Image (tube, rainbow, N blue to C red):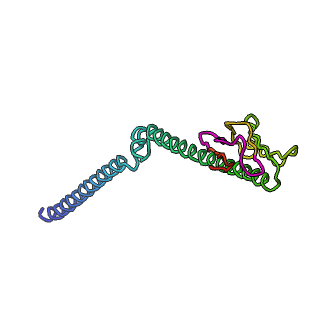
Amino acid sequence: MLRWNAPLRRISVMYDSAARDIITHRAHAASLSVFRLKSAVSYLRSPALRLPSPVSRLRSHPGSTLVEQLVVITLIGICMATTVSTIVRLIDSAQVHAASRNVAELLAFARDRAIATGQRTAVRFDGTRNRVVVHSGTDTIARLALHDVAGVALSASRDSLSYQSSGLGYGAANLRVIVSRGAVQDTITVSRLGRVRR
């Protein structure tokens, strides 16, 4: 009996050992599968796989709101309006100064012509057509159309002035010619001696 007990004991020990290995293996496999399951769940819960909601998507990306964009567009519009009005004023100023220089040169030319030829020379200011015409006798010597050249308006305190052969101006006492465009204007004054000042 002892003989049979020893092999049975051995078988029993081997069975216990195998059962323990199986149980350990299954427990290990179960813990491994639990670990895998936990890691899979945590991976699925990770922010990388989570689909963001539309609200969180808007908040998570840096950008600007509609109000901020409207403020920027308003500021750009104000700057553009200021710049454009300044540029228009500069253009008007340049055109007015060029036209007043031309009128002053035309008046000086008429005076020099009267002195050189010894004939009376007349200068006529036409405010409706914005032009200046120089006559010597019955001849038209020069004509300056200011509106066509520079788009400026002309007004004068008198409609004409004439230079004597001595260079003195008849009807020139405090004659004022105003050349204007937009908000810019320039005044030309002719003295009693016929001299032109700007």
**Is 84 positioned to the left or the right of 152 in the image?**
left
Given the current orientation, which residue lies at the most extreme front position? 166
Residue 185, percent from left and from top? 61, 42
Identified at 73% across, 44% down, the residue is 146
Given the current orientation, which residue lies at the most extreme left position? 2
Residue span colored magenta? 163-186
Most foreground residue, 15 or 116: 116
Q: Quadrant of residue 184?
A: top right
Q: Quadrant of the N terminus?
A: bottom left
Identified at 56% across, 46% down, the residue is 86
**Is 190 positioned to the left or the right of 125 in the image?**
left
**Is 5 positioned to the left or the right of 88 in the image?**
left
Most foreground residue, 74 or 103: 103
**Is 112 positioned to the left or the right of 56 in the image?**
right
Q: Is residue 118 above or below residue 184?
A: below
Residue 158, percent from left and from top? 70, 36
Q: Is residue 153 above or below residue 195?
A: above
Residue 191, percent from left and from top? 64, 46
Given the current orientation, which residue lies at the most extreme top position? 128
Give yes or no for residue 173 being in the magenta stretch.
yes
Most foreground residue, 32 or 149: 149
Identified at 47% across, 41% down, the residue is 69
Residue 89, percent from left and from top? 59, 45
Identified at 68% across, 38% down, the residue is 156
